[in-house]
Image (cartoon, rainbow, N blue to C red):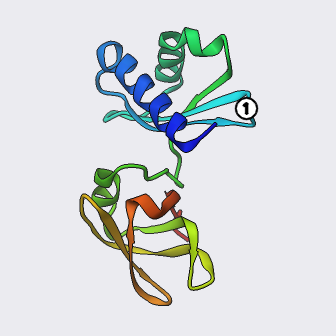
Amino acid sequence: MSEESVSSLQAEIETRLATSEPEVEVLLAEVVGGATLQLFIDHPEGVTVELCERVSGHLGEYREHYALEVSSPGSDRPLTKPQHYTRFLGHRARVRLRDARDGHRNVTGELVGASEREVTLAASEGIVTIPYDQIARSNLVPGD
């Protein structure tokens, strides 16, 4: 599945849940191995098994095509939107780039800035600014 399809799939799911579970935030929806739809969700009061079951129930048509896994983001929470980066300024994150930069595809460091177009990390190699369109995947790095 192309990245564009994944984005449209996530947008479809967000739209579907907006009316039935308006406080649920879809952090990431992706098809893994062509057969499993993984959905990471968040909620202001936390993610419970009951919430995951309710969300799964609202997405019945997706279960006809995929094995559906709905879960909380965990300590290595995916970062997929500009507001995620802003919310977690001061935390460590790992960013996988679409294309290698200076021979590296991954940058890990403290989130020190985020705008509508790019994120800035204080990494071991210095301050690194990455446009969102260059990010393949990103997540928080759990504390040591």
Q: Nearer the viewer, residue 131 or 112?
A: 131
Residue at left 53%, top 75%? 107
Viewer-nearest residue: 109 or 115: 115
Give the image location of residue 143, x and y in percent: 51, 67
Find the residue positioned furthest to the bottom. Answer: 125
Within 10 Å of the Cα at label 1, are there few (<14), some (14-19), or many (20+) other Cα atoms?
Answer: few
Question: Can you see residue 72?
Answer: no
Q: Farthest residue to the left: give it.
A: 115
Amino acid found under the numbered disc labelled 1? Gly
The residue depicted at 54 percent of the width and 55 percent of the height is: 76
Q: Quadrant of the N terminus?
A: top right
Question: Pointer 1: what residue?
Answer: 34
Determine the image quadrant of residue 30.
top right
Q: Is residue 28 above or below residue 140?
A: above
Residue 141 placed where, x, y %?
A: 52, 64
Q: Is residue 101 left or right of residue 8?
A: right
Residue at x 56%, y 85% (from the top left corner):
102
**Residue 31 visible, this angle:** yes
Indicate the position of residue 60 as horizontal and vertical percent values: 56, 9
Q: Position of residue 106 (x, y in %)?
A: 58, 72
Which of the pair 42/38 is nearer the observer? 38
Q: Secondary structure at mark 1?
A: loop
Q: Residue at x 52, y 67 (%)?
A: 94
